[in-house]
Amino acid sequence: MAHWAEIDENNIVIRVLVGSNNELDEGYQWLIDNLGGRWIKTSYNTWANTHSQGGTPLRKNFAHIGGIYDERLDAFIPPKPSQTETRLGKPIVYDLDEETCQWLKRVIES
């Protein structure tokens, strides 16, 4: 099944739907004609720039509601974790790994 992410004007994912594999365009035109909006194909089998079935990863990650589509990277980036987390009283920040488009946890050492 083809999966499609709808993104808003700020490239935030607002919903993810399944398209029809019975259509040549995998349901894309039906989404446009019936729901409007901007739709970008996403792969349920892609996470951290790896395809779970050994295929070619698509847009580095499966789209998640609240995540962002980055046009420059042609990638879906999951929502950023909270910056309020601490470890042994030291703040934790998250940096984006552009290769995988995953958030990497880093402890700030004082």
Image (cartoon, rainbow, N blue to C red):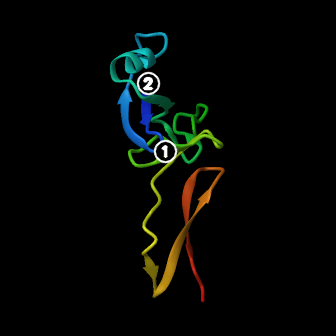
Residue 22 image offset from top left, x and y in percent? 40, 10
Mark 2 → mark 1, Cα distance in angstroms? 23 Å
What mark, if any, has residue 31 been given in the picture?
none
Q: Which amino acid does label 1 sit on?
A: Asn
In this image, 103 relative to 22: left or right?
right
Amino acid type, callout 2: Ala
Going 41% across and 44% down the picture, which residue do you hit? 64
Binning the other alpha carbons within 10 Å of mark 2 as few (below 14), some (14 to 19) or many (20 upward) gives some
Q: Name the residue nearer the viewer: 76 or 50.
A: 76
Q: In the rendered image, which quarter contains the C terminus? A: bottom right
Relative height, residue 13 to residue 79 (above, below): above
Give the quarter of the image for residue 95: bottom right
Q: Residue furthest front?
A: 9
**Residue ID at (43%, 34%):** 5
Question: Which image quarter: residue 26?
Answer: top left
Q: Is residue 7 above or below residue 93?
A: above
Look at the numbered disc 1 and give the secondary structure of its residue: loop
| Vertical side of 2 occupied by 74: above or below | below
> Which mark is nearer the camera, 2 or 1?
1
Do residues under tags 2 and 1 come within 8 Å of each other at their CB atoms?
no
Q: Which of 108 and 30 is in front in this view?
A: 30
- Between 68 and 43, the residue placed more toward the observer is 68
Q: What element carries label 2?
A: loop
The residue labelled by disc 1 is: 10
Q: Where's residue 73, x and y in %?
A: 64, 43
Q: Residue at image x 38%, y 35%? A: 16
Question: What percent of the width, then of the height, locates residue 20?
Answer: 38, 17
Residue 98 place in picture, x, y as percent: 64, 52
Tag on residue 2? Answer: 2
Q: In which quarter of the image is the N terminus?
A: top left
Indicate which disc, 2 or 1, sits on the residue closer to the N terminus.
2
